Amino acid sequence: MPEIKVLFVTSEIAPLIKTGGLADVSGALPAALRNLNIDVRVLVPGYPQVMKQMGPSEVVATFSDLPGFPASRLIFSIMKSGVPLLVLDCPDLYQREGGPYMDPATGHDWADNHLRFGLLSKIASVLGSFESTLSWRPDLVHGNDWQTGLTGVYLSVAAGAVPNIMTIHNLAFQGNFRPKKVGLLHLPPESFHINGIELYGNMSFLKAGLYYAYHITTVSPNYAREIQGEELGFGLQGLLRSRNNDITGILNGIDTGEWDPETDRHLPEHFSVGRMAGKAQNKQALQSRMGLEVNPDVPLLAVVSRLTHQKGLDLLLEIVPRLLELPVQLVILGSGESSMQQTARDLAQEYPGKIAAMIGFDEGLSHQIEAGADMFIMPSRFEPCGLNQFYSQRYGTPPIVHNTGGLADSVVDCNQDTLRDGTASGFVFSGMTTDNLFAAIQRAVELYRDERKWKALRRNCMSKDFTWETSARAYRRVYLKVLGRTE
């Protein structure tokens, strides 16, 4: 018998549909929870990508008369990971080309996103109440980000409703809509209130999720503290401060099967903490592939990121001429703001053999960069958790990070003391200025020249445990707390 039954609700799940870290969490956490005897089933919209990739399936429920929503049905399938999937098939809302949130023709959000994710929340509430016709019924509903935010509102008026929790992956995305949409979604009229779903005159899916949840989690302990302050609270800091006792920060893990330098199918040469020769061969291969001068002695810095203001890469691009004097090489993989993309291209053209930039994304190349680079740069202005700093440490590529969110929780600054006690795993700077970022990179380059200390730092990085098991155990504790059960 499973200890707990959980309905995990998400708008994306790797490897079926992915735009960011939420998909990675949704793909990995449920599998880790199932290893702890928790019966997790994932509810996800039936986008074309999901419908094409799911395995053998059967229709387990139909919904033809939900007020305000088109007809839909629920399809049961099982992912390759063994996690059961409940796919919400509603062609009117989900069968569209492009990503899950945006119209590719206009580059704008789908005009009916309130209905698309209102339905996802509504079905989650049906499955978590006496309305469900399924034989399987959860003890708890676990929603993720604004797209699942109305679940708690619908549960609040449903008969036999189970408790729900809400995980914030990025507070900046809130799902705010004009108030007239409240009626279209058949929400309780009284919910449109400051003590409810109203946020500065609009209806906020995320605020609804935070207000109506029994418990709130975020993807790192430090981010849980930061979002209660004005700078990173994005207008919700008052509500979050009032719920301080109901917030738990749990650091994400990574898929250590997919990200393993000993077995990674994308690498020209495998390596491990006890057999590091392959690391140098990966560097040489990366330099060759990206058109950089093949030189084992020059530190190779790397970026794999969205090129946006949040990621702080404007600061890095600004100091490139100074960095090249250290000297270093730089490889950039990513896309984002057009001005930043152009700057990266211009720098690569101006400094051939020293800087390489690929605009776009290439999964295999991202693995080769983590393996071949000497240092990884993540100067994010804010970062709820982040994933690349985990990948970098696992691949013996010390990250250089800003002291924020999950970066601060997962990277220990390298200094004399932390190097001696074996905890050092990267370079951390505070204060978002070009000088502070440059100073951190300069420290890393200086240590790189000390072969004995650099080896010790890489060994520390590669010895850390970033599996999902630790995170899953923390979520299990939250579930038990919400359900009023003891360990």
Image (cartoon, helix red, strand yellow):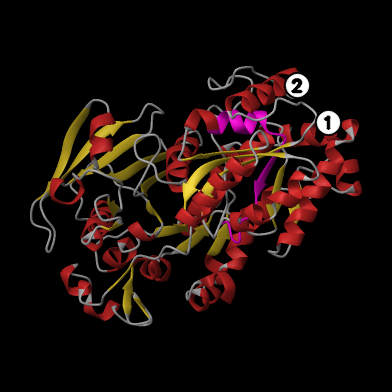
Which residue lies most toward the front here?
A: 350
Give the residue type at disc 2.
Met
Residue at image coords 63%, 22%: 285
Q: Residues within 10 Å of mark 2 (few under 14, many from 20)?
A: some
* Spot occupied by residue 276 in the image (x, y as percentages of width and height): 75, 21
Residue at image coords 47%, 64%: 172
Indicate the secondary structure of the residue bearing disc 1: helix
Q: For this rendering, which residue is in front, 449 or 269?
A: 449
Is residue 169 shown to the viewer in this render? no
Indicate the secondary structure of the residue bearing disc 2: loop
Q: Is residue 24 left or right of residue 160?
A: right
Q: Quadrant of residue 301?
A: top right
On the image, numbered disc 1 is attached to which residue? 455
* Spot occupied by residue 44 in the image (x, y as percentages of width and height): 30, 45
Mark 1–mark 2 Cα distance, whole angstroms, equals: 9 Å
Query: What span is in magenta?
Result: 366-383
User: Are circles 1 and 2 on residues that touch, CB within 8 Å?
Assistant: yes
Q: For this rendering, which residue is in front, 176 or 64?
A: 176
Q: Is residue 148 left or right of residue 274?
A: left
* Spot occupied by residue 14 in the image (x, y as percentages of width and height): 40, 37
Which residue lies most toward the left here?
A: 65
Q: Residues within 10 Å of mark 1 (few under 14, many from 20)?
A: some
Q: Is residue 268 left or right of residue 4?
A: right
Q: Quadrant of residue 405?
A: bottom right
Question: Is residue 71 part of the magenta span, yes or no?
Answer: no
On the image, numbered disc 2 is attached to which residue? 276
Q: Quadrant of residue 295?
A: top right
Residue at image coords 61%, 32%: 369
For residue 328, the mark is none
Give the residue type at disc 1.
Lys
